[in-house]
Amino acid sequence: MINVTKTYLPSKEKYKKYVDEIYESAQVTNYGPLVQRLEKRLEAYLGVKNVVLVANGTVALEIAYRTLGLKGFVITTPFSFVATTSSLVTNQLLPIFADIDEKTLNIDPNKIEEQITTNTTAIVATHVFGNACDVRAIEAIAKEHNLRVVYDGAHAFDVKYMNESILKHGDISTLSFHATKLFHTVEGGALIINDDNLVQKARYLINFGIENAESIPHLGTNAKMNEFEAAMGLCVLDDIEEIKQKRKIILQNYTKELKGLVEFQKQDKNATQNYGYFPVIFKSEEELLRVQKALNEADINPRRYFYPSLDTLSYIEPKQYMPISRDISKRILCLPIYAELGIAECKEIASIVKSALL
Ligand SMILES: Cc1ncc(COP(=O)(O)O)c(C=O)c1O
């Protein structure tokens, strides 16, 4: 069976050495030495400051909103993983969608402006499939209207924009280190906080809001990463360049095989790619379903990422209608891509897609 992705597992021997260290120190969680080491290594690798590791990418978004003290209406994308929207709702924030650009699949800055009211406090945008948002346009809008910006960078690990980490943009960027991601810690995530003055507050918030033994000034939660997860991250980070290189070859192969038959996401020219996903856009949902069926019959499981469009979620009030996101979400499929996927398998997948399109 070939799934859309396969978790990268590093050398067991190397992982065991970290496990020995954990047994030695007997500190398994609560901002232990391996979490601290991984934060430093990620800051150096990504070229960012203030990495705060957390339990997953969803809670990273929630802590970002709470660190910034967001209230009221937040303009966000309808084309993302459900956590981008649900994290707002669970934090008493009202998601107001701005439709996406049909080529880049990212939130369209022109549509953001149309949705701003006096109740708007922030913009939450996703770098969809690691494709950099139009950060300059979003920053200009945020500055003009005095809005905060959070980037959901769950897919944007190690993406560079004008030679610098894309994660440096916005007040806070978040990452997901779920096992399905390019870089992972089994479960995990991070905040990259631009304002040094907010880092300590985020650290209190992920640890129940506790400041010290006598004082609990913030409404916090438990969002800590543990030492076993950090150990996995330290191992995977050693191999990340090789992982990316292998994925790059698969992406190039698919692109060569499928060019002209399907549409690809338009990449921002100022940004690099990280080869995390391989989305293809079909002419119709009927075409997509035909391809999906043919692949499933060969025991290959692509993923309808992102489907359905988030403006269709039953718990969103007021009801909203985002035509471009709804249309794209019906026609987009992510093909399998992971370091271990062989070129022969990649060619087989492409050939099944081609035959189903004839
Ligand atoms: C765009 C996006 N945001 C947020 C998340 C949530 O991350 P996690 O699964 O680590 O909670 C995901 C996870 O797949 C995602 O794809």
Image (cartoon, grey):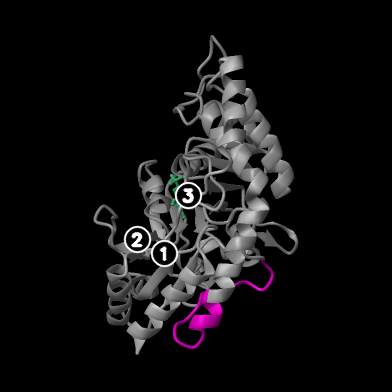
Q: Is residue 177 visible?
A: yes
Depth-wise, is mark 1 or mark 3 nearer the camera? 3
Q: Quadrant of the N terminus?
A: bottom left
Pointer 1 residue:
79
Snapshot quadrant of residue 269: bottom right
Query: Do the residues bearing badges 1 and 2 touch, measured as CB atoms within 8 Å?
Result: yes
Question: In the image shown, does 3 or 11 lie closer to the viewer?
Answer: 11
Q: Is mark 2 within 8 Å of ligand 1?
A: no
Task: Give the magenta-colored segment's residue range.
Answer: 254-271
Question: First in sequence: mark 1 or mark 2?
Answer: 1
Tell me the distance, in whole angstroms, between the alpha carbons under discs 2 and 3. 26 Å
**Above/below status of 74 relative to 214:** below
Direction from residue 290 to residue 303 in the image, left or right? right
Label 2 environment density (alpha carbons within 10 Å; few <14, some 14–19, many ≥20): many
Depth-wise, is mark 2 or mark 3 nearer the camera? 3
Tell me the distance, in whole angstroms, between the alpha carbons under discs 1 and 3. 24 Å
Residue ID at (33%, 71%): 295
Tell me the distance, in whole angstroms, between the alpha carbons under discs 1 and 2. 6 Å
Query: Magenta segment: does it hold 14?
Result: no
Question: In the image shown, does 251 or 299 lie closer to the viewer?
Answer: 299
Pointer 2 residue:
310
> Residue flagged by tag 1: what amino acid is it?
Phe
Pointer 3 residue:
7
> Residue flagged by tag 2: what amino acid is it?
Leu
